Amino acid sequence: MSEIIDTDIAIIGGGPAGLAAALNASKRGARVAIIERDFELGGILQQCIHNGFGLTYFKEELTGPEYAQRFMDLLKETNVQIFLDSMVIDLSADKIITAMNPERGILKIHAKAVILAMGCRERTRGAINVPGMRPAGIYTAGTAQRLINMEGYMPGKRVVILGSGDIGLIMARRLVLEGAKVLVVAEVLPYCSGLVRNFVQCLQDYDIPLYLSHTITDIKGKERVKSVIISKVDENWMPIKGTEKVYECDTVLFSVGLIPENEISLKAGIKLDITNGPTVNEYLETTVPGIFACGNVLQVHDLVDWVTLEAERAGENAYAYSTNTSRGGKLLEPILTVPGENVGYIVPQRIDYLQDSKIVQFSFRPKSPDKNCIIEFVSNEKVFDKRKAKHIIPSEMLIYKIKLNPEEIGEKITINIKKNLKKSKEEA
Amino acid sequence: MEVEFKKPKQGDVPEIICTICPNSCKLQVFEDEQGEIQVEGAGCARGVEYGKEEYLDPKRMLITTIKIENGVLPVLPVRSQVAIPKEKIFDAIKVVNHVSAKAPVQMGDVIIPNLLELGISVIASRSMAAKNKE
Ligand SMILES: Cc1cc2nc3c(=O)[nH]c(=O)nc-3n(C[C@H](O)[C@H](O)[C@H](O)COP(=O)(O)OP(=O)(O)OC[C@H]3O[C@@H](n4cnc5c(N)ncnc54)[C@H](O)[C@@H]3O)c2cc1C
Ligand code: SF4
């Protein structure tokens, strides 16, 4: 027997994306249900105990759990249904969710609209192929973060970290404060991929060296990690012979990126993009009508504030869908967005409606860092809008609200990040 | 940011990286003959302020966990209410490591009232329900 629940909007995942989407849709009068597999709401924020959240959204600096708590408190004032300890195992294109709950058994949730908010998971060592043995003492940085900050368990005493993303940098400091020695952070790129502030406050403050253009070329140890070998790499990320250095350690952390978690989306037949997230239109709607996506399941965000703002839009759009609100005439063929010069990806991947001129929010990431840039929005081989950017880096998402005018827009919209030659000459 | 880690050599003017905006200006901060603090290399006025503060009185937030009895989790995240002097971080950690809490705890509850006589308290940065209700 399975329990059947009927609702207007069902949200899969109760992290910051799910919480903000639920609050927004519920405020508009929808019946909302959140389905979360963990024992509490808040998602990954509950393990991010450091400060630095909320500066954009609340104009205040909060820790991860504090940021989550603000939304959880607001949720208490609503009648949003919350299903904890409920793991979603299936989603169908006609918007029936199947979840497993240890006490209630199988739940079937029928919804008019669904919002995907499952977040992301970490890339593991396998995903980047580091050679060597497989002894104990190898963790992803996020796993170590959960162990220390939520389970009170120290993963090791002498640590080497691969990857200079923010989670890796933050864990370096956290480990030092808990009494471990962090020997080195190795980064294969020629620049630090985390925020400067984290480089200064997590590495520099504690004299932890950062080796750029370096990688781990071997991990030694039978039962437990005994040592790692770190080598310098050339421009093609190939280790350079003769540059090997040995570090004796008992623990290795990998902080090598995040991947949107979309196994459930695939079950509903949703198409994914190069982001590993669903391809969406300007309403954050996937390729299945009435199923929306927001937060890290859509694209990996560096700031939770942007997750919240994106999720609020998803909540609003899902509500409009559930009440059959018209969006105007649908285009026969969608307008596709195309990542051009130095652009890695673009969300949304397509524009489905453009009867009258309207404002659309684009978010995208540069492929490599640069200074003094011009961001061009091109259609019909003409630049219809452009913006200046003083400093760009792949770890910081770019977000622009751009007016689209049907007369100016052709079959596709290309975004290019170009060097502002005039400005660069002035500086030189 | 393109930084290879360098330990400052003795006698060098230490370089302070401004963290206020992504430009990451490299600031040289020193005292001139008149005893005035000079900041060079800042791209804007905010960087000058930052450089002075980092030189004279750098502060950092204290962020860690403490043990908690009877909580749904075994540890509770805590933080200093405001940033504390950077050189006090390790002393503060020592104090905090000797303290434990008992669930239930509300976010914002004071855990240590006057940390190291700094007039700054350490507070719980999340609420934690009790495992077994008494
Ligand atoms: C390890 C790690 C550390 C991070 N640290 C930082 C940081 O320091 N600062 C920062 O700004 N950002 C950080 N991020 C990015 C951070 O994830 C985002 O800012 C934000 O938390 C994303 O929100 P979200 O709601 O999209 O995803 P999440 O917070 O990941 O929430 C997703 C939720 O969905 C639930 N879920 C997933 N699948 C299912 C399912 N099948 N059934 C039911 N529930 C499901 C999960 O349990 C989780 O609660 C970190 C990310 C990771 C992975
Ligand atoms: S000095 Fe000004 S321009 Fe330079 S990093 Fe600081 S805030 Fe940015």
Image (tube, coloured by chain):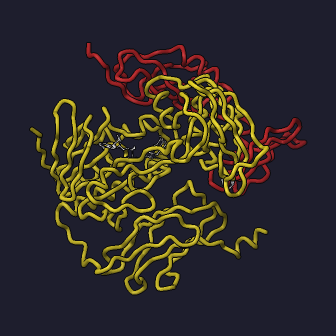
Point out the quarter of the image occupied by ligand 1. top left
Residue at left 44%, top 30%? Answer: B125
Residue A183 is drawn in which quadrant?
A: top right
Report the residue that reaches farthest toward the left: A1
Q: Quadrant of residue B88?
A: top right
Q: Position of residue A319 (x, y in %)?
A: 22, 59
- At horizontal 63% and vertical 64% (from top left) the residue drawn is A390
Image quarter (top left, top right, bottom left or bottom right) of the C terminus of chain B: top left
Q: Is residue A129 above or below residue B72?
A: below
Residue A196 x, y percent position in the rendering = 64, 47
Above or below, A258 relative to B7: below
Task: Name the one closer to the observer, B7 or A228.
Answer: A228
Residue A120 point in image, percent of width and height = 41, 47
Q: How many marks?
A: 0
The residue lying toward the viewer, choosing from B85 and A170, is A170
Q: Is residue A379 visible?
A: yes
Question: Which image quadrant for residue B23?
Answer: bottom right
Q: Nearer the viewer, residue A131 or B120?
A: A131
Q: Is residue B46 visible?
A: no
Please tell me whether residue A406 is drawn above or below residue A234 in the rendered image. Answer: below
Which chain does the yellow colour mark? A
Compared with residue A207, is residue A308 higher up or lower down, i.e. above or below? below
Figure colour of chain B = red
Residue B69, position as x, y percentages in the image: 39, 15
